[in-house]
Image: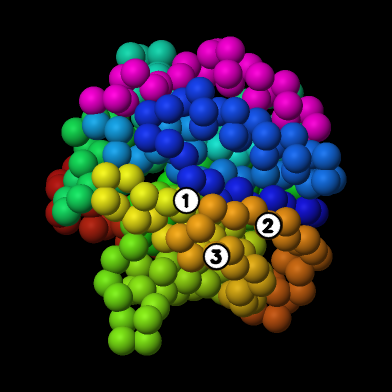
Amino acid sequence: MLVRLAQTYPRLGDIEYNFEQCLESIRSAAGDGADLIVFPELALTGYLLKDMVSLTGLRDDDPKITELIDLSRDISILIGLVEHGRDHFHYNSAFYLEDGRLAGRHRKGHLPTYGMFDEGRYFAPGNRVRAFDTSFGRAGVMICEDAWHPVNPYILSQDGAELLFVISNSPVRGMRESGRFQSVENWQRITSSYALLYSNFVFYVNRAGCEDGISFSGSSHVLDPQGELTAELPFLEAAEATVNIDLDELSRARIGSPVLRDEKFLTSLNELKRIKKESFGD
């Protein structure tokens, strides 16, 4: 399985430019024989949108989405965008397009509203965490802050996910004495932990570039089911790379470390029900 990671540098609010850049990347990846291309969170819009959210939202039947769906007959596509929901709310969403259809949709559930983040003011939260079937196996998607809540990869893994995708707009924060940044190191710790614990491939695709003085770190990467780093894109710079994934590694990893197999799901569920009753009543 060939996966193209597209670490893009979108222009804030310029959906026409960003869309054309994504089309160019999709066509190039398809021409190179890639099976799937993965874009960052809000790849079609940029991040610090504020009041532009309502101007950049796309419905799932928008002509731009229809064009992407048509392209998905040649290559599967995972892309982040502002979704204009049929309920007239706007969502920070990821669409998974494959075989000429919208095969999966995830709406970001955890909307950070602290520090530089102000998502809760403009977006409605998603309320579903579900894996879905693809041509390559069962997949799950998290958008940035979603991955900081361990219950989400737990649910996705219990729902059969073999491929975990984390798309992100993560800024550069916390410079270390080593010259590395805490934000970059934290993402590698988180993603490698999920890959190792659940014996999944984890694809982390973050954007690059600057907006309003905020730098986004890039540093997209892929972890194998042993939790080992197999590919990493540059820091800060827009870049693309194609990664060759051997899906047979899933079986080898799950034999060698059967943590996912031995998870006591019903025990977890029963204890969560107990905590709910004790904390919130019937």
| Residue at numbered disc 1 | 207
Please name whichever residue, 61 or 206, is drawn nearer the observer in this view of the structure.
Answer: 206
| Main SS, magenta residues | helix
Residue at disc 1, secondary structure: loop
Question: Which mark is drawn over residue 246?
Answer: none
Q: Which sits earlier in the primary sequence, circle 2 or circle 3?
A: 3
User: Per the image, is 73 magenta?
Assistant: yes
User: Per the image, is 139 magenta?
Assistant: no
| Residue at numbered disc 3 | 234
Q: Which sits earlier in the primary sequence, circle 3 or circle 1?
A: 1
**Left-right relation of 202 to 48:** right
**What's the residue type where badge 3 is placed?**
Pro
Give the magenta range. Answer: 51-75
Graded by Cα atoms within 10 Å as few (under 14), some (14 to 19) or many (20 or more), the crowding at tag 2 reads: some
| Residue at numbered disc 2 | 241
The CA span between labels 2 and 1 is: 13 Å
Quarter occupied by residue 220: bottom right
Please name whichever residue, 161 or 59, is drawn nearer the observer in this view of the structure.
Answer: 59
